[in-house]
Image: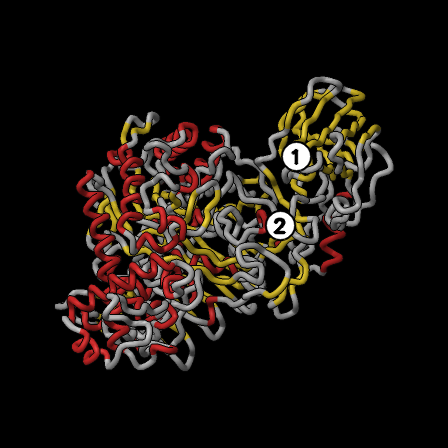
Amino acid sequence: MMDRKRIYRVLGWFVLACTIPAVANADSIWIEGENPQKKTVTKHGWYDNVRKDGMSGGEWLSHYDKRRPGIATYSFTAEKSGEYTFWWRGNVLLSEVAYQLNGGDFATMSLRDKRGQYQVSPNPDHRALAWVKVGSLRLRRGKNSLTIRFQSKVANHGGTDAILLDDTGFVPSGIRKPNEDIAAKPDEWFPVVFDTDRFSADSVIDMSKYIEAPAGQHGFLKRDGDALRFEHAKQPIKFWGCGANVSIGRFTREQQTTRIKYLCKHGVNMVRQHPLFGEVGPLQNGRFDAKRIDEFDWYFAELKKHGLYMTWSVFYPLTIGPNDGYDAKLFAELPDAGRGRKRTYGLVNIEPKLQELQWDYVKTLLLHKNPYTGLRYIDDPALAVLETHNEDSIFWHFPLGDLRDPKKFPLHSKRLRQKFFAWVKQKYGSEAATKQAWGRLRRGDSWQNGELELMGAYHFGGDGPAYDFKGQTKRAGDFIEFLARLQKDFYERREGQLRDLGYKAVTVTTAWKAGGPSADPANLWTDLAADMIDRHNYFGGGSGGHHIAEGAVRNESHLSRPGGGLLAIGLYQVENRPFSCTEWTQLPPNQWKAEAAPLMAFYGMGLQGWDASYHFSSSRAYPGDGWPNLSSYVTDTPHYIGQFPALFFALHHGHIEEGPVVARRTLSEADLFAGTDPLHQDLSSGHDVKDVGDNAGTSPTALAVGRVTIDFDKNATAVKSDLSRNWNRNEKTVRSATGDLKWDYDRRLVTIQAEKTQGVIGRMGGESIELPGVTVAVQTPFVSLLFTPLDNQPLAASTRILITAMARDQQTGTEYSADGTQLKTIGGPPLLMEPVQAGILFKGSKPKRVNVLDVYGVPTGKTVPTDASGKFHIDGRFRTYYYEVER
């Protein structure tokens, strides 16, 4: 890998500020922001005290003055007249920027489409650089002038780093300039920069042909045993999806259409709107905000037109106002949500009135007629899945932890203590009988006042109640049963309301878990009220939490732990129920995130037979620049969206065989309410991350062999297969029961050995591996290298093969510690991809051509040389991760 100085030198981070007004060639003009010919700006000590190592020329023009806007005029010469794309790099946060060409009228820039945001301030605030594709300017031959004006409500603040006027199609990123690239070397990390896709008909990766449009033509989506199937279709369907919100106010309709086409192209056939309530907004006098619902209606209709289905995650959370009919004293206890509204937290699982308010909203939405489809949502089969609420459980720390503290929610807490008392009294009849069953009552119990003390989620230990409830196992079991029946009653009523209203598609309760292992099976049991079981999972990340920040990195790989990490939620799969994962990702700055999507596709959706996957989350119409917005949740980056075409193709055509059940765990109600964890699988620790060790009742390694399920049918027969036939503990390898997949956890390598899709994920160590249809020798330390037969033939016989070759990525200037556990320097755009260096020899006919594709999957006209045997070598000289083999 190049050292840091080499990266900087190649991409021009040390380019000195120009001493002339602009740098130009026949097709592009680069202007340094700090060099205007005229300016009326005020440099402010605090505002200008920023990082400048990622600025073009090491400087910018900044303005911060409450008294007046800042203005700067740049003069430059165009060698030819014509239309030029206008790119501007400056401060894009809370600033209003306008421009004026050659003395004409000022026009305001739209700063919505920010690219490669680079935080220049020591702490996140309203100082950040990004490129904006402003639009098109018609320049005259010879001298021109461009004036930039800043103003804002903060202090008319703003700043310009650089301006580019270009008609070559060049896309700027960071301080990378046109014609600045040098000859690439085999091991040299290469920049990848995207513009809006033009959707060339020549793109090899375009999967939109397999997405039937419009959505809904085969009727409503239904639960069919443990699968999903449209009511008029013969075969089940799998959904390879992502979160993709309407993002009210962010996109024009043209941009939304482009965004939808981009998702279709990459094989996305389902999107999840999360949360719908948060974007469309609350009801006002029984009506939706007209502009917001109209924007959502149009987006839904446009998705449907292109063949994409939608999942509704309606609440996260429900917020209510003082006039919504909730008791005023209870309302006063709720946490503030702003604008006079209150958050209902997890209290909605307990309070019927809050459930009623949820239902009023869902019912109104389902009965709303979309003017762009002509259908009410309840009658539209493009609405495929409806989730009761996101990440909420009666067994979670919120509400139980807060309700246990009488000072935080005193009235709500008292109400739940009274409900628990009433339930216990009905079960045991008297105080004496209750004491006999439990052994004793506690100081917080009052039989006379009709209240019993609550447990917190942290008390639900796997071997019995923890902390101050230790030893009170029977009481813990009763409390779990009380809460479970309370929650299941809510879910069953909601299911009944939906069906009585006429909703015909698939339902989900929630994706959430309990806060302790002894309550988790009971929580899962309540999810049986709806059609499909859903869970979320995350892996990786670092000290920045939801954002990328310098500091500690959770830099583990899945590959040393078969069935662990993201795949561990497979232990929640229920017999005879569809299963989905509506949120997942391997969070950057984890360096191995290229492994996540193929593992989820091949092991989760393939071997385990999951029915729907939604990566979290897509928010644009092209892969973002650098690590987009320094966010931990980004579909629009090569490791995710870039691998989607190959993964969707394999899933759509059934290349990975579903495995047999190798472990079926059976649970009775007595097991659920025993006060201990009958499964011995603690997936409750932490928040987003759900994982389990090998000391679990069922080893997660079983997930690398075949299907693992839970059965709540009292007549079900448990299955516990002998895994030793597939799990070689001496060699540290696990082979799937289908033979399609092999996991070598000693080498940290997974091989895909199906008849059609094949590949390697992980560490090759420079060795050669023979797959059924191809032999590969990889020099790159870590790869995801996939071979997809686009004619859907066995790989050895295929005449057209897509190669998807991913390794690590990082921003320009990024530095990790030697062991990868510390992110020392974040760096900035553009994104650099480590090239996959591999020798490849297909079995069968020799290649006629090996085409180099660009990042849009379009042939570049360049080819990879092959030798007399048909062998060829891919590496960094080709600056891509897509190749097409023609035979």
Q: Secondary structure at mark 2?
A: strand
Task: Tell me which numbered mark, 1 or 2, is placed earlier along the sequence.
Answer: 1
Residue 166 rendering spot, x and y as whole percentages: 69, 30
Tell me the tag on residue 831.
2
Viewer-nearest residue: 35 or 840: 35
The residue singled out by tag 1 in the image is: 153
In this view, the residue farthest toward the left is 715
Rendering coords of residue 212 (x, y %): 32, 37
Is 314 displayed left or right of 522 in the figure? right
Q: What percent of the width, then of the height, locates residue 817? A: 65, 67
Of the two numbered discs 1 and 2 in the rendering, the one whose residue sits closer to the viewer: 1
How packed mark 2 is, by other alpha carbons closer than 10 Å (few <14, some 14-19, many 20 or more), is many
Question: Is residue 165 something that shows in the picture?
Answer: yes
Q: Amino acid at mark 1?
A: Lys
Please give the name of the residue rendered at 20% of the width and 64% of the height, measured from the top-left corner: 422
Q: Is residue 298 left or right of residue 192?
A: left
Image spot of residue 155 (x, y percent):
71, 36
